[in-house]
Image (cartoon, rainbow, N blue to C red):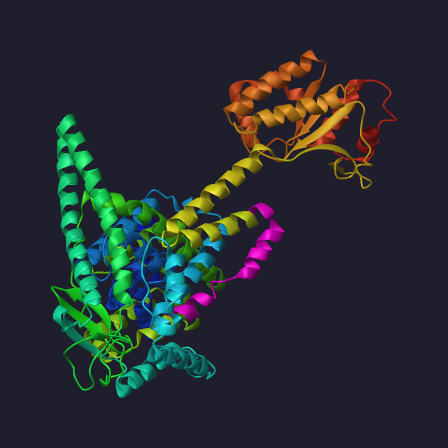
Amino acid sequence: MSVRLLRFFPFLAWFPLSALTVRADLMAGITGALVLVPKAMAYAQLSGLPLYFGLYTAFVPAIVGALWGSSRQLATGPVAIVSLMTAAAVTPLAVSNTPEYIGFALLLTCLVGLVQLLLGVVKLGTIVNFVSHPVILGFMNAAAIIIGLSQLDLLLGIPKGRSDFFLGDVWEMLRLLPQTHLPTLGMTVFGLALILAIKRVPALAKASVLVAVVITIMVSAAIGYDQRGTAVLEDIATPQARELVVQYEENLRRMEQLGAEVAVLSARQRQAEKHDSVWMAAGLRHQTELAQLDMRSMERRHNELLRGLRQLRFVRPEGEETGLLYQWGSSPEGMRTDDRAWHIKSVDGGVMKLVGGGDVVGSVPAGLPALTFPTLSFDAVRQLLPSALIIALVAFMESISMAKAMASKARQHVDPNQELIGQGLANIGGSFFQAYPACGSFTGSAINMQAGAKTGLAMVFNGVFVAVTLVFFTPLLYHLPKAVLAVIIVMAVISLITPHAFVHTWKANRGDGVVALVTFAVTLLAAPHLDKGILTGAALSIGLYLYRSMAPRVAVLGRYTDGTLRDVSVHQTLATSTLVTVMRFDGSLYFANVTYFEDMVLKAVADHKDAKFLLVVGDAINSMDSSGEEMLQNLVGQLRETGVQIVFSGLKKQVLDVMRATGLFDRIGEENIFATECQALKDIFDRLGQDVEDDALFAYVKVMVC
């Protein structure tokens, strides 16, 4: 089979398939899907999309990622971190669970896929190396805490606002702890206890989540956990509460109108710029900016009103499914209530949807996701592209790290560029079938491996099983409590919180420890804008690397007792020579550190005024740019004028090639360039031509075989 054919259709490498392989992949696919179905819906809860979008994301992306990726066990689908980042990217642009929000999410998926595909095609899989391990460590830990805290409202049944300061929202929610919805808290405790108990049963341990979901669905249906109703504005007996609902709906309508106006103005501005209408474009740009300022003001007002709306609690007269709603604690004296705290779920045209019990999944549309095309608009792409770049990198890092870990166990090869192509196609394909951004899942991949998956066919079977669930079993999910899904999420992300890793990183390198801690703090404080944390960490990590490379270690060497040359600053009793200064430079010579190298050389010469030779041990110089070459040209001349001859040893081929190409090799002289420091020192002492028997380094050279 040709390499070119495998490049375009990597799944052909699976063939021929034996019956045993197909059977193993089928069992692994079904096992993985049984765990994936409830988790996919739980992760969709994080994304701000309807829960069934988690199943859509576990369908097409799983199949496409397996067919065009290079790993045979990687499970592509929804994951907690990317789900949260999706919500963070789209929430500023639209209200969650609305058609506009869904449209932005699908466009984001397509952009993420295009970024990954482009990076894979141009073979830039190594770009993830710019985001160091300490950055990922800090980001993952902070994101895990954010994910856990984001589920508190569902675990406790307390309303939580959504603003640009996540920790502030959490603090405000915690002030409402006395309003904890006891049935929701009870279902949370029951679900947690159930999952932990089932995990202790060996035969059910792998399917513990699925079993717990089935049991809680039956319990929820049996006890009437879900209570829903509707009301109109006139049903609210309290004038202040009724006015709040009216203001909320009016502000929401104005936001929609203003959003449409901004889109029209932006389109007219681009058209004017295209036709070189400078003055018209400037006027339209000014109008657009003013409209955007108004939009931001309305968004702040929307968040304030939404926060107030979610804190409203009503009671109804006993035995009435419709009728007046009285605020909690303000019902007429003597009136018997239904003892339920009714919350407003949504408002549309003056009609309010009410929730009076625990929150459940509700109706899930039966059938496969329809083929849709993401709505492209310049403004939407411009606003989502930065988030798409970050999500694409984070998603790929999570995917490739898991793929490499499994490949080492299975003794297989993983091609990062092909994996980028696979993940990119998975997200592009998913965007046409209502999926939000997907990536390789740690949990799903581990289950795939443990279940005995041999090829990516296991994930194809996995996706098919999810499709069967969408077609036939969605009505069974109606009574699934969202509190149980929140428990599943919290249990999944607990393993991502690793304080011991911070300690280990700090011990290994304090600079890396600082990078990890700063990334952690910025990510936590900037939430829900998670991209700020990872961008800050990456910039700090690159800056730290540049700082280190600008001043690499420079050591003046002396003779150790075993005959080797070592750093005299570490071993201050080492024997040194008065005739030859030996120094080692532990870094490449490039524009950022050439001045530092020159300063260190001149300092070494000044500190050893009687030395006629300077030997530079260049084993650690891996490369040299034009700035380094220019500096050496000048330095050789400077030292010769002062009567000091510079000699090099251990230079690598790539450094010597630069020297030969620029004439620096001839300027230094072939007689001053040696393969080892031993050969260089022998030649230097031969050239000195005087009695050097008492020199410490000469004694070292006499006993060495070069």
For residue 22, say whether it is visible.
no
Question: Against 100, is 468 above or below?
Answer: below
Percent from the top left, x then y, of residue 223? 28, 87
228 vs 500, left or right, is left
For residue 607, say whether it is visible.
yes
Question: Against 580, is 434 above or below?
Answer: below
User: Which of 674 and 32 lies nearest the eye of the viewer?
Assistant: 32
Quarter containing the C terminus: top right
Quarter containing the N terminus: bottom left
| Residue range (magenta) | 488-512
- Count of residue discs: 0
User: Which of 378 and 262 lies nearest the eye of the viewer?
Assistant: 262
Percent from the top left, x then y, of residue 617? 67, 31
Percent from the top left, x then y, of residue 3? 34, 50
Residue 494 in the magenta stretch? The answer is yes
What is the chief secondary structure element of the magenta stretch? helix
User: Which of 282 and 276 lies nearest the eye of the viewer?
Assistant: 282
User: Which of 526 and 319 lies nearest the eye of the viewer?
Assistant: 319
653 vs 395, left or right, is right
**Measuring 20% from the left and 83% from the top, which residue is drawn there?**
317
**Measuring 40% from the left and 47% from the top, which residue is drawn there?**
532
